[in-house]
Image: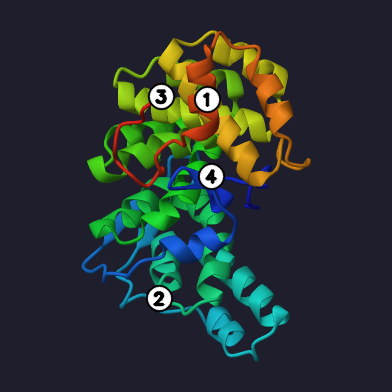
Amino acid sequence: MAGIPFRGGSLWGGFCGGVTCSGRYMKIICGSILFIAGIWVAFAQTNQSGALPVTTQNANEAQVPPEVEKAMQMPESPERTKAVRIAAREWAKKDPVAVLSWAVKLPNPIKDQVGQAIPSICAQTNGKASADWSVQKGSNNWLLHPLLFYWAAIDPAGAIVWCGQAPEEVRYLAYFSVGDGYGMKDPPGAEGWAVKLESPDDRLSAIRGVALRRAREKDIPTLGTWLKSLKPEEMMVGAKSVVWDWQANNFNNGGVKNNEAIKEWLDQFPLNDSQREDILKTPLPGIFQSKKIEGK
């Protein structure tokens, strides 16, 4: 099954410490990789209707497919990178946990290159097993955002259930990521889901992800209408999510940096001078933190 195209980017170029960053983000957040042992899930089902059972194995016991080995033995070159990415994606269709466990042990830069290639396939093959693997001992949370993003874009219901059971330390990130991915698949559905979440922390994190996706899809008029319908704190969080992404990635995700245009966009909201200043100068916390989002 082909991967879903990643329109407009995600946290792959997303928030780190409240400020959007580029591909360097991957290198910043990659920490030490802890050994994941003793995992065997027999006949683990995907959350997609009609999908085949998937087997997951201990990373040490999983045999690296010969196609992957052959590609890795090629001289370092763009052709090698392409071959490794293709072979790894094919492996992900059969055993997502095995390929993820293998990928995180690679040296850079091939680790980053493979890490960007496989999450969409892993999420399609078995989103739950892939997300569960990512939070094992908290060592591979840098892959959790793309895994949840793609899973929510394919099967939002399954990803939402997983969010509700997510460990506390990644809950903040989980709701943001699902809001981002669900917002690409079904913007109205994502908006309705986000505002109905009971936990204030979960709700604000999800709103942040949905607002960011609306902005990156350049659906600016609809985004403004939705944000104005929210409660004040929710509106502030959504506006901050958009403004800080625009400021970091050029206005409207592709134009020139234009602070005046951003200020003009904020004019439509019922904000006092202090709130406008706060939106423009105070970033939201990094999405890898489990702290409460402060929107005021």
Nearer to us in this view, 121 or 150: 150
From what the image shows, is residue 126 above or below residue 85? above
Residue in the picture at 71% in, 37% down: 251
Kindly identify which residue carries mark 4. 150
User: In the rendered image, which residue does mark 1 sit on?
Assistant: 277
Amino acid type, mark 3: Gly
Give the amino acid at mark 4. Tyr
Left of 127 or right of it: where is 186?
A: right
Q: Marks 3 and 4: which is nearer the front?
A: 3
Mark 2 and mark 3 lie on one chain; the one further toward the N terminus is 2
Three-letter code, disc 1: Glu
On residue 105, the disc is 2
User: Badge 3, how many Cα within 10 Å: few under 14, some, many 20+?
Assistant: many
Mark 1 or mark 2, which has the lower sequence index? 2
At numbered mark 2, what does the secondary structure look like: helix, strand or loop? loop
Q: CA distance from mark 2 to mark 3?
A: 38 Å
Q: Which quadrant of the figure has residue 225? A: top right
